Amino acid sequence: MPSALKLRTYYSAAELRGLAKRTRDNNQSRRLLSLAAVLDGMNRTDAARIGGMDRQTLRDWVHRFNEQGPDGLRDIHAGGVEPRLSAERLAELAAIVEAGPDREKDGVVRWRRVDLKRVVKERFGVDFCERYIGTLLKRLGFSHISPRPRHPAQNAEIIAAFKK
């Protein structure tokens, strides 16, 4: 039979209960209460049941408590997936949208999501779907505005003369 795992006694059972009372993390509180029960002499199965876990899980938390103390009983959350466009590239995309398309270079007179998808693919090498381009634009503070149509061959001088 394997030997029992020793729980280090940095803290007394009363101190662990005090820490469990003060913490705002419910999972850490449950784990601290289970460890306090172990220090009080309760068998591991019953102590694990107090924390809503099985004996093996309690053993794993004892290892973390022995290595890291009470802070080791907190959940470790992963950071998530790295964004495909960095903050600098998002700022560059915002500048591109703000400046508007160049008719000769981009071949369009106003930006659509499908056009911005192509620009992002060409410029940054990242392929987004059209819907996500709309989400990016919303996150950058842009809203959907349809401009008044303008013929590409209209002359501003003729329009100004007509208005007079």
Image (cartoon, rainbow, N blue to C red):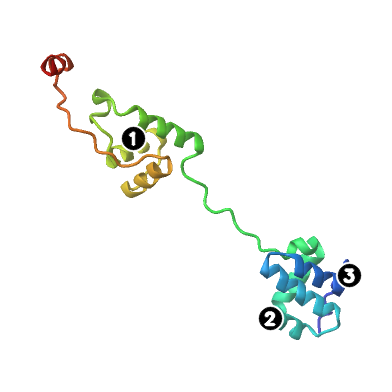
* Mark 3: secondary structure: loop
Q: CA distance from mark 1 to mark 2?
A: 54 Å
Quarter where residue 101 is shown: top left
* Callout 3 amino acid: Thr
Q: Is residue 139 left or right of residue 130?
A: right
Whichever of labels 3 and 1 marks the residue nearer the N terminus, that label is 3
Q: CA distance from mark 2 to mark 3?
A: 22 Å
* Callout 2 amino acid: Asp
Callout 3 environment at 10 Å: few (<14), some (14 to 19), or many (20+)? Answer: few
- List x then y, in percent, for residue 133: 35, 44
Mark carried by residue 119? 1
* Callout 1 amino acid: Val
Q: Is residue 111 left or right of residue 90?
A: left
The quarter of the picture where the N terminus appears is: bottom right
Mark carried by residue 9? 3
* Residue positioned 35% across, 33% down in the render: 97
Q: Is residue 103 above or below residue 112?
A: above
* Residue positioned 67% across, 79% down in the render: 52
Residue that badge 2 annotates? 54
* Residue positioned 38% across, 47% down in the render: 135
Q: Is residue 51 left or right of residue 65?
A: left
Q: Nearer the viewer, residue 134 or 146?
A: 146
* Mark 2: secondary structure: loop
Quarter where residue 108 is shown: top left
Q: Is residue 60 visible?
A: no
Q: Is residue 50 left or right of residue 42?
A: left
Q: Nearer the viewer, mark 2 or mark 3?
A: 3
Q: Is residue 39 visible?
A: yes
Q: Nearer the viewer, mark 3 or mark 1?
A: 3
* Residue positioned 79% across, 60% down in the render: 68
Q: CA distance from mark 3 to mark 1?
A: 61 Å
Residue sitting at the far front: 164
